[in-house]
Amino acid sequence: MRELEDLSGLSMFVRIVEEGSLSAAGRALGVPKATISRHLALLEKRLGAPLLIRSTRALSLTDTGRRFFDRVQPIVRDAQRATAEVKSHNAAPSGLLRISASVAYGQAAIAPRLLTFMRRYPAVRIDLHLHDGRVNLVSDGYDLAIRMGVLEDSELVSHKLADIHMVIVASPSWLEQHDMPRRPGDLAGHPAVLTRPDMIHWQVGGETVRVPWRMSTGNMILTRDAARAGLGIALVPEFLASRDLERGTLVRLLPDLELPVIQATALYPRAAGCSAALRALLDDLLSSRPIEVDAAPW
């Protein structure tokens, strides 16, 4: 029982400091001021040192109190998060999940999973945003982001979802007017359609090739469509080009050379913890069943 009493006292002490007074802490915790005062007195007695200087107008920390607060506040926060996680683990998934994903992968791979997930958990609501720009999960209020490519260092928790193979493609009409590239260096003579203007360096067969670009689309699906329209060569995920390659509306270039494999990754804020709904969704995305991708609709 002593451990429980100590944790309760620590929690109340932290709340007193954060709220600025015993009365405010009592209101925040929903307990009488007398209870807050009694727990504080017991804590100070056990420690053998005063933690707070109390007056009629103000409340301040002693030097010991400041050092003690700096040490115990993270402990109290971790304990509170652990308690919330255990409670949510036993609860049925429910509530709102705000999710950000790239347009191509989100439409082809994530959206079908979400439809199945929502049928399984009718109390969960999904607010899905498909766009190729980067978001700040914390400031923009997202619970989960699905990103493709190299990740920047961050405090986000990351889980690999899938490997995505890339292909270099062009339309038959483009190849009627330009020589078929035979080696990586030949790509430098073919204007490209890019998703972003900074994506001009392609790793092909162990070589780095700088391609000239004619159009930047801001979207992988539009990049594929522009290549299919004969506007240039393009480097796109294989799942986006598979139908066109089967139908002959796109031709794969340099098929025997190795291209980079990029990752699709799920990210969520570490500090936010993991709700029952988010945990259930992550379990589904990370399950042994592969995330199948289909070409985005024509």
Image (cartoon, rainbow, N blue to C red):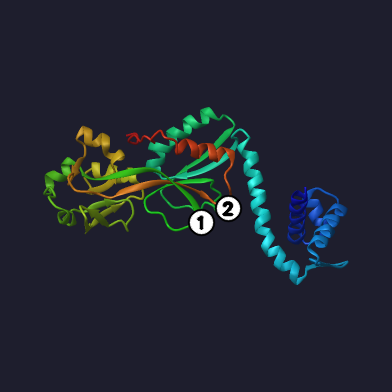
**Image: 135 above or below 124:** below
Q: Is residue 98 left or right of residue 258?
A: right
Across and down, in percent, residue 280 comes to 53, 36
Q: CA distance from mark 1 to mark 2?
A: 9 Å
- Pick whichever of labels 1 and 2 is earlier in the sequence: 1
Residue 30 spot, x, y in % from top left? 80, 48
The amino acid beneath tag 2 is Ala
| Label 1: few (<14), some (14–19) or many (≥20) C-alpha neighbours in 10 Å | few
Front-most of residues 221 and 235: 235
Give the residue displayed 88% in from the left and 66% down from the top. 56
What residue is at 18 percent from the left and 44 percent from the top?
Answer: 255
> Which mark identifies residue 140?
none
Residue of label 1: 155
Badge 2 element: loop
Element on which disc 1 rests: loop
Residue type, numbered disc 1:
Glu
The residue wearing badge 2 is 271
- In this view, the residue in front, 173 or 51, is 51
Q: At 59% from the left edge and 42% from the top edge, which residue is drawn?
A: 275
Residue 158 vs residue 140, the one in the foreground = 158
Q: Residues within 10 Å of mark 2 (few under 14, many from 20)?
A: few
Disc 1 to disc 2: CB gap under 8 Å = yes
Query: Residue 84, how many percent across, how many down?
Result: 65, 44
